[in-house]
Amino acid sequence: MSLQEQVEKWLRLDQDDKTRAEIESLVAANNEKELQRRLGSYIKFGTAGLRAAMEAGFTGMNSLTVIQASQGLASYIESTVPNAKERGVVVGHDHRHNSESFARLTAAVFLSHGFRVHFYNTLVHTPMVPFAIQHLRLAGGVMVTASHNPKQDNGYKVYWENSAQIIPPHDAGIAERIQALNNTTTTWDKTLVDTHPNCIQNQTEALKDAYFSAVRNLVSTPREILSATSLRYVYTAMHGVGLPFTQRMLENFGFPAAILVSEQVQPDPEFPTVSFPNPEEKGALSMAQHLADTSVIKTTTSKTAVVSSMSPNSKTTTTTTTTSQQPVGLVLANDPDADRFAAAERKRDGSWHVFTGDQIGTLLGYSLVLKVANRDAAAKKRVALVNSAVSSKMLRSMCNVEGLRYEETLTGFKWMANKVVELRDVEGCDTFFAYEEAIGFMTHEAVLDKDGVTALATFVELAILQHEKGLTMVDLLEELYEKYGFHASDNYYFICHEASTIKAIFEKIRFGGANTDAAIPRSNFRRPDGSVLRYPLTVAGFPVTYIRDLTCGFEMRDIPAFMSKNEGADVVDIQQGEFYPTMPVSASSEMITFELANECVFTLRTSGTEPKIKYYIEKKGTDRSTVSEHLKAVVKAVGDELFEASKNNLK
């Protein structure tokens, strides 16, 4: 279509006065550049659905693109899921600008297509959508949220009938239906949810009750121990929807009530106290930490002693009461849609330790280890711990020692949740924990997705058990490092706005190049299509022992032995299907993993939503100074040798 045709199409379809006016003003100003940006392409339906800035145009999140997405999704579910209309779907929303409006339009489209719709008529945290799908055996669901994105963004998160986020081929199938139906709109009636006989709104509170009932076995410590603890903690909802869910979860198990960051615990789509509503961001927990610093806990201790004189009948009983004061030692946080969890703990010197996602994942994984400790070896094999390829391998080390099953997946909870479904339905596993380093944790299988509220409760239970022993969560981490090996990581990214530069960087890593440093030995693996893979065989001077390339489809273990066996060969031919990864391969994104002889593993990948080249580097060892030294060397080598950051002007 020409730009003029796209403008005409938009004005023909859009019935939202505000977004129509945006496009009309751009037409009046003859702003072709901005019109082309907004109308020249379509918002991409990809990772779990849609996410973009709220603005007029086919590239933005707005009423029209939500309706079109819902049309395609409804059509695809109807043709793919058995008895989809009778089973129905669930639609929820958070507190962001336009979230309720987008949710109402989504529900209206499904109702117009003949679906039953369970519509949450109050704000819910994201886990309530996958929970309802599994609990009610629905055909799918949609949560309108942009999670921890900036306030100008919104999103459309899609869950399949198995209650996990969608994965291929469903994402592509839905995208095709959206495109096929984008010349029309089904309905703009936001009031259908209030009047349509197939819309069920009166189950919201019952579903909340069912959610809390389903996770009642999450915590196993006796209530009297939990309620008697002197441990106190500060909580922030990051201006999101988490407060009522967190408060009820704490109350249900008998935990002490949280001290609330009053400025941040109520839903506010403006996110006024944070520049970026993501608990991972530097400084995001500052207000909560300050409240903890200035909140004093009074602890009263009484000691009774019996004092006897020389006379056998002379005894005196004395009671000494001591009152001490100490600041609050723990900070807990959810992101705005409360599907993620973050924590910080006061160290003995008064400073704060902000836990990384990998550290929280290690602690929560160990919580499950404690709960299944009395199982026999066969039963332990039905316990599965799952994390993503870019998360710490500490979980793998833990499983190796404890005799539990470990699984690694692609990045993103959609892959982990679907792996849990497979392990449950095909492999016979019955107990699970899953996490990704971006502070997402699944601590109960009632929700096959990350859930920041159940993660918080699991963390608090473990913290109380540590506190009663006079220890901290950092102390527990140290114990786990001693038991399973010290793991240190460095995860960050380079910014690159040129797609051609990113492509060239990964092509050089994969295939070498004319200017490749001759001092770094490279592989020569010729595939059946004639292409020759020339990966570096050393990084920072350490031999490469394992390579997995999920972009072009290559995986090889014990590389030094393989190269030694084929020593002298100019090129080693790979047969059809040989050295192909067991994990899904996608040419649409870059992702390569290396393991080195010094027990260092790192993954390089591109971001699907941002102009970033990300690296996730982890080193395991016993001597911490050596671990630190090697980790720094590999981080430097990734930037200098592999990304060539200076040459490619990467920031």
Image: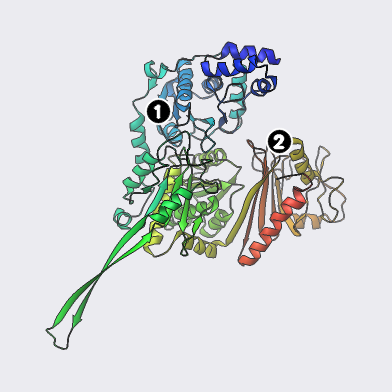
The residues tagged by marks 2 and 1 sit, at their Cα atoms, a distance apart of 38 Å
Q: Is residue 14 visible?
A: yes
Q: Position of residue 580 (x, y in %)?
A: 71, 43
550 w.r.t. 45: above or below:
below
Q: Position of residue 531 (x, y in %)?
A: 82, 40
Q: Residue at x 59, y 21 (%)?
A: 178
Secondary structure category for the residue under label 1: loop
- Identify the residue under disc 1: 120
Q: Residue at x 36, y 35 (%)?
A: 208
Question: Does 198 sit left or right of 13 as displayed?
Answer: left
Q: Nearer the viewer, residue 518 or 641?
A: 641
| Label 2 with label 1: CB-CB less than 8 Å | no
- Identify the residue under disc 2: 587
Amino acid marked by disc 1: Tyr
Amino acid marked by disc 2: Ala
Q: Residue furthest bottom?
A: 310
Secondary structure category for the residue under label 2: loop
Q: Is residue 183 visible?
A: no
**Label 2 neighbourhood size at 10 Å, few (<14), some (14-19), many (20+)?**
few
